[in-house]
Amino acid sequence: GIIFFFYWISFARYHVTTSDAYVQGNMIRVTPQVTGSVKKLRLIDTMSVKEGDLLLEINDTDYKITYEESKAFLATELRRVVSLFEEVNRIYAEFEREKIDLETRFQLFKDAEAVVDSGAIPREEFVQRESDYSAAKEDLRALHSRLISAYSKVQNSSVYTHPDTLSAVEKVKRAYVNLYRTKVYAPASGIIAEKNVEVGEFISPSMPIFAITPLTQLWVDANFKESQLGKIKVGQSVKMTSDMYGDKVVYNGRVIGIAGGSGAIFSALPPQNATGNWIKIVQRVPVRILFQQYQLKEHPLRLGLSMNVNIDISESLDCISECNFEHEVKIDKTDLFQEEQVGLRAIIEWIMKENAPVDLTVSYDLQNITFDYE
């Protein structure tokens, strides 16, 4: 008893322990982004992979055809849009010529009107000039309507920024990305698990085909009794051992969070103590503990392994709002998807230059075009 008392007074009262603790980590379940039959497979369960490794290939025949069709469609749209701009310029040039002709006929009509009463010209010639002027004015009005109609199809744009061109460009992008996605790459480094696909199978975006467990992004969820939680604070240091390596390997960690409720509350069927007979059960609350990452490289662990946790509660800090663990917590991200459109810009620019060497535009404002003569 004396030995136990001195052990408690010098050590045990400053520590809380539990063996109800397990290694947790991210489980990345990979699904394809396009449909198709599996052509090649380069993975097996328990295989170690690195981020960016090519793991699976889908039959890409249909996607190659769609991609080539989209490039041909873009070329066709470019040529059509060029013709729209040329049509505007042609009608505008015709409009300017007709405008000059209208002005001439207007002057002839005014000259005849001034002398017709004096008999200097026959009335038949005056009537003819008046008729020619009226016909020219109506022709110009109709031409003006055609010009507005043609201009409305290209206004505020150029060949390269026309909506039809941009729509065709997006079709090329979509076809190119879909073709790229027929190859499935590892989104992170880790161990392959739950392989659920074989060569020749038809897969779709809703079908998980395998999972990756990154072994460098692990933590421990230690479930402490509610009677132990009173002195556990965020930021306190932790020592842990695993059944895998025994007591000879001690992991150092730090408390980075305490769950907002007991495990029973977050279960699929939370208990309702207001019904039936009631029996008091000591609840447990998960406490999240972060490893020192360099130790995982020296002595790697696996998800679900049991851990023995010892928290030093003599540290009286509580930095729920002040502590910053961003330098310790790895931000989950991948640069894999930035490769989807690599090289696409050069392909689109080449198609544009081949089919529309000059980026045509309309520089004049139709609001300043007038043609009415009194």
Image (cartoon, rainbow, N blue to C red):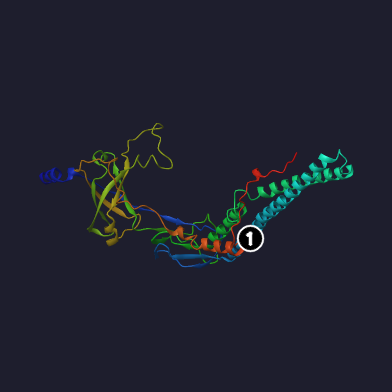
Q: Residue at x 54, y 60 (%)?
A: 178
x then y, percent, for residue 21? 30, 50
Q: In this orientation, which residue lies closer to the viewer: 371 or 79? A: 371
In this rendering, is residue 105 above or below 48? above
**Residue type at mark 1?**
Phe
How many numbered tags mark residues here?
1
Q: Is residue 181 visible?
A: no
Q: In this orientation, which residue lies closer to the viewer: 79 or 50? A: 79
In this rendering, is residue 160 above or below 57? above
x then y, percent, for residue 80? 66, 58
Q: Is residue 17 left or right of residue 350?
A: left
Q: Is residue 150 left or right of residue 6?
A: right
Q: In this orientation, which residue lies closer to the viewer: 80 or 61? A: 80
Q: Is residue 354 visible?
A: yes
Find numbered disc 1 in the image and state the secondary structure of the residue it sits on: helix
Q: Quadrant of the C terminus?
A: top right
* Residue neighbourhood size for the residue with mark 1, other residues' Cα within 10 Å, grouped as few (<14), some (14–19), many (≥20): some
The residue beneath circle 1 is: 73
Q: Residue at x 58, y 65 (%)?
A: 64
